[in-house]
Amino acid sequence: MAHASSSSNNRPRKLWWLVGLVLFALSALLQMPAAWVLEKFAPNSPYVQHVSGNLWQGSAIWQLPLSATPLTGVATWSWQPWQLLLGKIGANVEVSSGQTRLDGQVKWGRGSWQINEMSGKIAPETLTSVVDWQLPNTPIQVNAVSLQRRTGSGSGSVAKGFSQADGQLTWVGGEVGYPSGGKTFYLTMPPLRAQLSVEQKNNKNLLHVNLLNNQDKRLGDLYLDGDNMLDVSLTQRLLETMPEYKGQAPQDTPVVSVRQPLLSGLSGSGTQ
């Protein structure tokens, strides 16, 4: 009996040693410099210029070569350790570029990523870095945007693409100058709301951005698939804000359709 009692006392002691060892290893991992991790897994990345801090919390200077002058900014993060219990890596993040500010939660899982409760604003100077248009000096407000996207085929019948989307973007609008064929066309964008959702078309899981005016009347639709192809459809109601447009159709009729890669060729002309 004494021998059995001694063995039972040793087992809890070994368990505590194991727990302590795991916590020590996790603490050491989180204190690893973020710059070293980036160099290890993404050496010579053209999108990150400087990284400071560690895996628990830190910051990075990023750039996106969207135009002749790259779009640059700062991203900061703080780790959410409880996401490990769900099999994910999660962090609170804040992204800024000039007057643009966005903050929310980002999570990475096996073959997927998601953004939760992203809010803030996208400043006009950020927009002009993305598209070669003349835009009004008004920001886009981002309101509690949540996205979930699978980056691979995954298991079973689940295909890559968007599986969840919610939230909205709002814009007060203004005069927009759109260059096409060596000429600039102007239209007056009304105040609009972009409502996010997920839609399935042709066996693809698409992000659907429904463009509406203040009276909830349809202005157009954007669809983004898992291959980063963007489909744009604009209605007669929106085109009527262009003084030189002479088309005649019911206001809900799609009169312009463009398909192109996301963030590629935005300053050029599409197919109509």
Image: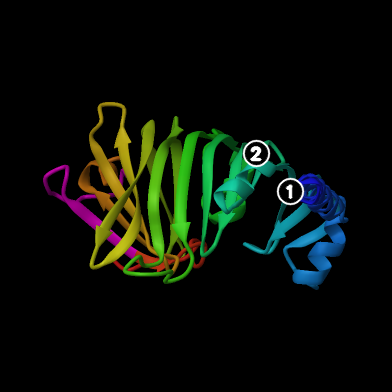
Occupied quadrant, residue 69: bottom right
- Regarding mark 2 in the picture, which secondary structure is present there? strand
Towards the viewer: 169 or 245: 169
Give the dominant element type of the magenta stretch: helix, strand or loop. Answer: loop
Indicate the amino acid at tag 1: Gly
Residue 67, position as x, y percentages in the image: 64, 62
Residue holding disc 1? 73
Occupied quadrant, residue 66: bottom right
Residue holding disc 2? 100
Residue 132, position as x, y percentages in the image: 54, 56
Q: Are marks 1 and 2 in contact (CB under 8 Å)?
A: yes
Q: Left of 95 or right of it: where is 55?
A: right
Q: Residue furthest front?
A: 1
First in sequence: mark 1 vs mark 2: 1
Residue in view at x 88 percent, y 56 percent: 33
Residue 105, position as x, y percentages in the image: 60, 41
Q: CA distance from mark 1 to mark 2?
A: 9 Å
Residue segment shown in magenta: 242-258
